[in-house]
Structure formats: structure tokens, C-alpha cells
Amino acid sequence: MSYFRIYFYNGKKGFNIKYLFYIFYPGHLLILGLLKYVLYSF
């Protein structure tokens, strides 16, 4: 896995992953909450 990252590295800064976590974190909490609601509501 690391080999490909090193091999394809072009010397430029990549995508800022910080913004991905701003979306992912509340999104996964919402999905887990909905899943809990569906599984334990009956």
C-alpha cells in the first residue's frame, strides 16, 4: 500500500483530508444513531 503512494508521489501537496473528517464524523454518528433506532425500536 505504501509503495503505491511513494511511487505516484509527484512532489505536490495532495487533497487536504481535514475537510473529509468534518463530513465523515457527523455523518457516521447519524448513520449509527439511525441504525440503533431501527434495530431497537421494535
Image: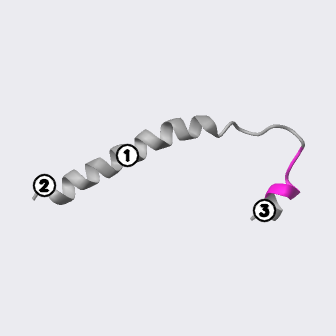
Q: Name the residue under label 3.
A: 2
**Secondary structure type for disc 2:** loop
The residue at the far right in this view is 11
Q: Is residue 17 above or below residue 1?
A: above
Q: Mark 1 points at which residue?
A: 29
The residue stretch that appears in magenta: 5-10
Q: Quadrant of the N terminus?
A: bottom right
Q: Earlier in the sequence, mark 2 or mark 3?
A: 3
Q: Residue at x 20, y 54 (%)?
A: 38
**Secondary structure type for disc 1:** helix
Q: How crowded is mark 1: few (under 14 residues within 10 Å), some or many (20 or more)?
A: few
Return the x and y of residue 28 as percentages of the image width and height: 41, 47
Q: Is residue 30 left or right of residue 1?
A: left
The amino acid type, in three-letter code, at marker 1 is Leu
Return the x and y of residue 36 as percentages of the image width and height: 24, 54
Q: In which quarter of the image is residue 30?
A: top left
Residue 41 is marked as: 2
Gap between marks 1 and 3 measured at Cα? 29 Å
Q: How crowded is mark 2: few (under 14 residues within 10 Å), some or many (20 or more)?
A: few
Q: Residue at x 86, y 49 (%)?
A: 9
